[in-house]
Image (cartoon, rainbow, N blue to C red):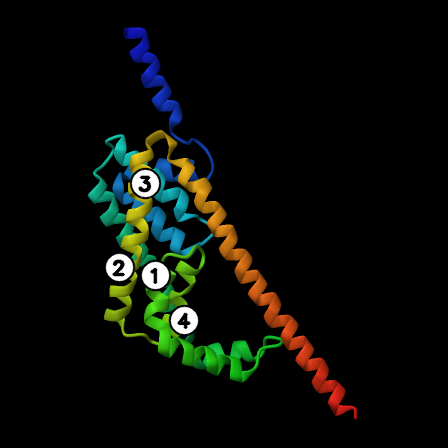
Amino acid sequence: MILNAAHDVSAAANEAPTGGIAGWATDLMDSMGAVGAGVAIALENLFPPLPSEVILPLAGFAASQGKFGIVEVLIWTTAGSVIGAIALYAIGALLGRDRTVAVAARLPLVKASDIQRTENWFARHGTKAVFFGRMIPVFRSMISVPAGVERMRMPVFLALTTAGSLIWNAVFILIGHALGTRWHQVTDLVGLYSKGVLAVAALAVLAFVTLRIRRAGKGEHRSTR
């Protein structure tokens, strides 16, 4: 009996990640508790290559082990999401519309009309973009920048960011809590989702570039007539 109990304790210890992003997040949570999970998510917002779909289920698993309460970690991770989003909003606001237009105008194949269409689209759909964008990998961080450029009202931005982040965080934390030692299964599944989103984005960019090159070629052909 004693040997079996010792074996179970040893196995539980070995289940905790010890390397990579998961190991880094585990160390933060071991040293800072739920606050560490919030810090990890704040950094994930600023550096999108840090995947929330690893950190959040891992935080749920840690909660299932009694390291902190599930409500506590949900509050801190949502706070981390909002803090990271505010930082990116501030970058967009400091950059401003004029600088953004000036930078975009120097990009190949980008026209002033593209910028205007983007602004018009954000004016019509910005609230939905900020809310639902919090649930799309990579874009969940980047959507805060155009919100800052367009100077979306801060109370609206905070409300949408908090609501979207709360839903995203709660889903992954609760699944990680339910799966326990198998928390990484949700990470593997969402990894496929993330790759799908990036693939669609890459195809959209490719289609845009191809269309622009064709139009430019037709323009040059007409000008030589």
- Residue 181 against residue 43 in the figure, above or below: above
Residue, x 52% and y 84% (percent of image)? 113
Residue, x 47% and y 46% (percent of image)? 191
* Mark 3 or mark 4, whichever is nearer to me: 3
Q: Is residue 107 visible?
A: yes
Residue underneath mark 2: 163
Q: What is the secondary structure assignment of the residue under circle 4?
A: helix
Residue, x 26% and y 42% (percent of image)? 34
**Separation of disc 3 and disc 4 at Cα?**
31 Å
* Mark 4 or mark 2, whichever is nearer to me: 2
Which numbered circle lies on residue 119? Answer: none
Q: In the visual, does 214 lie left or right of 93?
A: right
Labelled pair 1, 3 in contact (Cβ < 8 Å): no
Mark 1 surroundings: few (<14), some (14-19) or many (≥20) residues within 10 A:
many
Which numbered circle lies on residue 175? Answer: 3
Dot placed on the residue nearer the N-terminal end, 4 or 1? 1
| Residue 175 point in image, percent of width and height | 32, 40
Which numbered circle lies on residue 146? Answer: 4
Quadrant (top left, top right, bottom left, bottom right) of the C terminus: bottom right
Q: What is the secondary structure assignment of the residue under circle 1?
A: helix
Quadrant (top left, top right, bottom left, bottom right) of the N terminus: top left
* Mark 3 or mark 2, whichever is nearer to me: 3
Could you say which is closer to the camera, residue 48 or residue 131? 131
Dot placed on the residue nearer the N-terminal end, 4 or 2? 4
Residue underneath mark 1: 85
Q: What is the secondary structure assignment of the residue under circle 3?
A: helix
- Residue 163 against residue 18 in the figure, above or below: below
Q: In the visual, does 69 lie left or right of 216?
A: left
Dot placed on the residue nearer the N-terminal end, 1 or 3? 1
Residue at the bottom extreme? Answer: 225
The residue under label 3 is which amino acid type? Ile
